[in-house]
Image: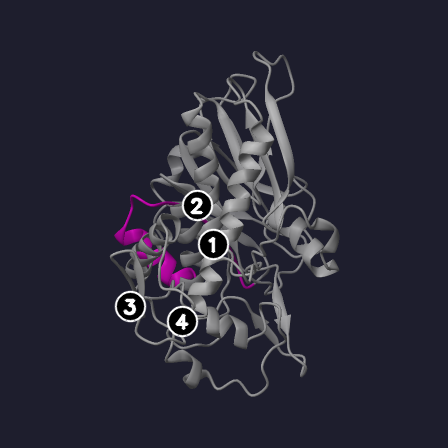
Amino acid sequence: MDGKVINFINTLPIFPFFLSLRRQASSATPAFLSQSAMRHLLVSFLMSVLLLTACAERRTPATSIEGFALGTVYSVTVADRAPDSLRQRVEAIFAEADTTLSVFNENSLLSRLNRNETDRVNDDIARNIALARSVSELSGGRYDITILPLVEAYGFLNDPQHEGIDIDSVLQYVGYRKIDVRDGRLVKQYPQTRIDLNSIAKGYIVDRVAAMLESEGSERYLVNIGGEIFCRGTNPSGKPWSIAIDTPYEGNYIPGEHTMTVLHVSGVGVATSGNYRNFHTGEDGTRYTHIIDPITGRNTASNLLSATVIAESCARADALGTMFIALGLDDALALLQEHPDIAALLIYAQPDGSMKIHTSEAMQHYL
């Protein structure tokens, strides 16, 4: 096995909990969240990343905001020139994303595209589809944003699991090659094909906020939306931004209580995907994972517990993290061997309940 391998012994048993749903909701409606959505709020924010900011002797005053948006929590820290009305500027980006990219907002542009009420796409959706396609090609089709019909059939959105799932009847509408964007219009091979951008959109929104800050002259900042991060420069103490990777086991919901390692980053996006926290239980008691193979249509199980990726954009890191979880450990390691330029940190379970870390050659620069 190439790369750096560190052995960690976990004192709690490993459970096959899987990739958390990335629910999106209006920032104006947190009071209407269900108990399960509130649990997701906590899980998303704690999912593998924690901002570590030194407390001693800040060299410059920092501006920080935090809140709830898009079904999760967010924080923005600016260590130099924060734009006026920072919160309003940030939440305006969230509101625009909710009306464009959300699969949970029935009136969003994405929802209307899925219902075939329009075929006109805007720049945000076109960029997300193009980036997703590049990751789909990299993964041999194991990462696929057209998986929404299968996600719904397994009961991972708002509706319960469909009884007697006919996978073949649904699978014919799934496949990244069955959609394309031409001259600003979405072209579908089948009208039943529908798109889910949850595995990439949150990272894309992080990038949008980062771009806004830089357009206002900020050079030292960190944007964190539910654990997806982009940062630049140094933190308020004048030191590199540090991000702790949480130990991936069921019940690790307290930030920083159990961490595996720390990354030191600047000018990059960081995202973590995990397969150990969220699952769906059918009426017969069967556990269904949120990781669904778009080629077979079946739930997948893997000892790969989490994947953290560093990339030039948070959107790409977001998509690649999901891709690695979908690939599983063996195929993920094989892909990293073929692409040593990808900075990835994989945490996986051993048969005896211990954990190991595999870091790619490119990731070791950030440790």
Q: Nearer the viewer, mark 1 or mark 2?
A: 1
Mark number displayed over residue 204: 2
Q: Residue at x 46, y 22 (%)?
A: 218
Q: Residues within 10 Å of mark 3 (few under 14, many from 20)?
A: some
Residue type at mark 4: give it. Pro
Q: Position of residue 295 (x, y in %)?
A: 37, 74
Whether residue 342 appears in this view of the structure is: yes
Does residue 346 show up magenta in the picture?
A: yes
Q: Position of residue 287 (x, y in %)?
A: 61, 74
Q: Secondary structure at mark 4?
A: loop
| In the displayed structure image, the side of residue 184 where residue 322 appears, left or right | right
Q: In this figure, which residue is indicated by the disc labeled 3?
A: 177
Mark number displayed over residue 294: 4
Does residue 55 show up magenta in the picture?
A: no
- Whole-angstrom CA distance, mark 1 to mark 3, is 20 Å
Label located before the other in sequence (3 or 4):
3
Query: Considering depth in this image, is 6 or 210 the residue closer to the camera?
Result: 210
Label located before the other in sequence (1 or 2):
1
